[in-house]
Amino acid sequence: MAAVRRGCRPWGSLLGLLGLVSAAAAAWDLTSLRCNFGAFCECDFRPDFQGLECDLAQHLAGQHLARALVVKALKAFVQDPAPTKPLVLSLHGWTGTGKSYVTSLLAHYLFRGGLRSPHVHHFSPVIHFPHPGHLERYKKDLKSWVQGNLTACSRSLFLFDEMDKLAPGLIEVLRPFLGSSWVVYGTNYRKAIFIFISNTGSEQINQLVLEAWRSRREREEIRVQELEPVISQAMLDNPNHGFWRSGIMEEHLLDALVPFLPLQRHHVQHCVLNELAQLGLEPRDEVVQAVLDSTTFFPEDEQLFSSNGCKTVASRIAFFL
């Protein structure tokens, strides 16, 4: 995918989270508490829906369902002056289909500081929760971090990557923050956004798209109602998924399951052209063809879907310039 832009201009890169507990503790102060409960305080929350929709339309290849679902859910949530619960989205799909790209776009077009905003919090199991034996400590730290930062700013965005690798039992500490209560632990949290990202359900999504192609259905005819049940079941059946026995699915705390469809050859071509434009280069047929020829497609018979989506497009282009 192309680099994220505000108003279609390039911007900076992702920053990790450091010092969970100490920073969370520092967030507890009277000014933050007043800001949190006051409708006048939106921190650096500056939603730009026009820019978001522009970027999604231009650069998110082959994801009509994800684009429509995310924009619709986000607009309805942000435009509600008094939401009864935070917005909770779960993104699912094959590698390289745009899940992480979409989350970076959301951060960029919702917060003035983008991913650098102190109110955007990105969690990776490999970086933040690497040792299963420390689960109880991680649970305490995560609860403190979310609680403290929601006290500092109710307009906060929490991103949880690679839910497939997250130790089961950790995410259950978030359950009180995701429901429809008005106040949790003395904190108003109803304007927060939680986004969970995983590959779980991708095989089921791929199979449904493949069957649609075999029956000569247009890709754009696929409806989210066809995909939601198979994604939900895949999560419920996966003991390695972060939602396993957390109560989050059982209590219907997810507002939307967002499917990302596997990318076909013309979608990869779209990504190559976007990347060339990002580099300030004119379209070059020989480069586009070389990248496509070096990309692996599956299933073996149909050779229909890119095995890594558009994930390696940028690095492959460098070989053929």
Image (cartoon, rainbow, N blue to C red):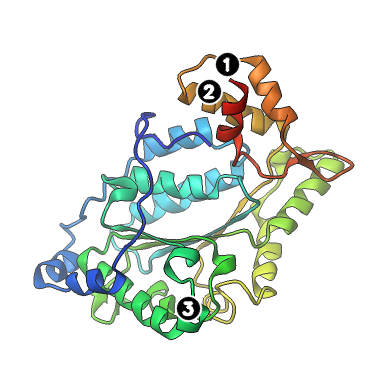
Residue at point 35%, 36% (across, down): 11
Rounded to the nearest angstrom, the CA distance separating label 2 from label 3 is 41 Å
Q: Which residue is mark 3?
A: 170
Q: Which residue is mark 2?
A: 276
Q: Position of residue 30 (x, y in %)?
A: 10, 72
Residue at point 49%, 76% (across, down): 131
Q: Image quadrant of residue 6?
A: top left
Disc 1 and disc 3 in contact, CB within 8 angstroms: no
Rounded to the nearest angstrom, the CA distance separating label 1 from label 3 is 47 Å
84 or 178, which is in the foreground?
178
Q: Which residue is mark 1?
A: 283
Q: Is residue 71 left or right of residue 208?
A: left
Q: Image quadrant of residue 193?
A: bottom left
Identify which amino acid the numbered label 1 is placed on: Pro
Q: Position of residue 167 (x, y in %)?
A: 54, 76
Q: Residues within 10 Å of mark 3 (few under 14, many from 20)?
A: many
Identify which amino acid the numbered label 2 is placed on: Leu
Q: Is residue 172 above or below residue 66?
A: below
Residue at point 38%, 69% (across, down): 85
Q: Secondary structure at mark 3?
A: loop
Q: Earlier in the sequence, mark 2 or mark 1?
A: 2
